[in-house]
Amino acid sequence: MKNPAEELVRLGMSTEHAAPKAPRFLQCTSALAGAGADPARYAIWVPGRIEVFGKHTDYAGGRSLMCAIERGLCLCVAPRRDRVVRVIDILRGDEFATALDPTSRGPQGAWGAYVAAVARRFARDLPTLTTGVDVVFASDLPSAAGLSSSSALVVATALALLAVNGHEPGLRLHPSITTPEALAGYLGAVENGAAFADFPGDQGVGTFGGSEDHTAILCCRAGSVSQFSYAPVVREADIVVPADLTFVVGVSGVTASKTGNARQQYNRLALAASRLVTAWNRHEHRHDATLAAALRSSPGAVERLRAVARRGGDTEFGSEELADRLEQFIEESDLLVPSAAGAIRRSALAELGVLADRSEQLAEDRLGNQVSETVMLQRLARVHGAVAASAFGGGFGGSVWAMVPREQLVTFVTQWEQAYRARNPRAAPRSEFFATRAGPPATVWQC
């Protein structure tokens, strides 16, 4: 087996983060052997991600600015002689098994639902994939923290099945899936139940999201933040992060769960965007698929869409809520994302800080998806020296990113963590703080 730490460093991960991964890969390999798995094996690295800018923009066809991080899932996988898909979380001692079958189902609200969604859609959409897989994984990615742990599992399951069936990720898999970007778009549809190209949708896992997370995990580049637009996924820019800066993630300890009431709140933001498009198409006699497409449809579309929002309220969505959703999308996608990319490219740190503060304020005021803990984390990060900081992910809990000079890293992390935990004793035991560079994307190699 290749040395996993050396392989990850070669791909662009820091030695500090790569070294602890090696024993986790070895644990997974040993567990596969103990389970009597086939000796032909693959190792897979699947990172989490930071959404630097682009809150709730992807499913509406907008833009985001993201990077992969140096935490994620270490997997070892082996082919089976049947169609069973068996996945084991070695650190938690959990196991889930299903089959490559169009009727596969997983337990709602549990991680098995994400595995089952991939098995179900692959069996229906890509029937040439007939080899099942044994998967053992170990993760150092905090779950339900806005870092895309669920989407990472979707990508991991997909890459495992592609590997044992002899396919490179996203390349010549299907006429509609010929690049990693197309694979990311497809896997976003798998998770969220949407149609993709000629493939019809299904129930997914119950969230109405997009493909931002899958895109970051599969397509971002080590050392850079990447700008993408969506529906379809298009890479617009890669911006190298200055070497003297690094990211720090503060996990609030408030779970960003996408089950129960939290799922309803998350989905409501997507439904509001969809409602705007429906009202627009009815008023304009058009067939635009996304909010971004509607806004690009003609020179006067922005003002006409604003008028649609003002008079488009009903018993489910008031006109003020629709207007807030529209204004947040326009400013975040069309102004803040490209402006932030430019600020990072020019090392204009004061400008970046103002842009991140504005993105945070839009999330609090227009999206209404922040909790007091993430608001406090963002404010404290700025007080203690972050050049920029913002909450990220779906909201209603989760994490905050901060960008800080490397020379101030240790002092900043200590002060940020102590200040937050002193003010939030109930969330403190579940909070976590760690530094990360922009890391490499998901990668498969043969053991």
Image (cartoon, rainbow, N blue to C red):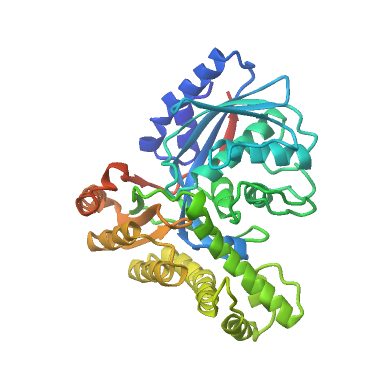
Q: Give the side of residue 389 with respect to residue 193, left or right.
A: left
Residue 127 lies, in percent from the top left, at 80, 36
Residue 57 appears in the figure: no
Q: Quadrant of residue 352?
A: bottom left
Q: Quadrant of residue 357?
A: bottom left
Residue 37 lies, in percent from the top left, at 61, 16
Residue at 52%, 35% (x, y): give it. 45
Query: Where is 160 relative to 206, above or below?
Result: above
Image quadrant holding the C terminus, namely: top right
Q: Give the side of residue 367 with respect to residue 132, left or right.
A: left
Q: Give the side of residue 31 with respect to residue 84, left or right.
A: left
Residue 339 lies, in percent from the top left, at 47, 71
Residue at 61%, 22% (x, y): give it. 41
Residue 391 lies, in percent from the top left, at 39, 59
Residue 438 appears in the figure: yes
Q: How many marks?
A: 0
Residue at 58%, 68% (x, y): give it. 272
Q: Quadrant of residue 348?
A: bottom left
Image quadrant holding the N terminus, namely: top right
Comparing 41 with 445, the one in front is 41
Query: Where is 139 relative to 363, above or below?
Result: above
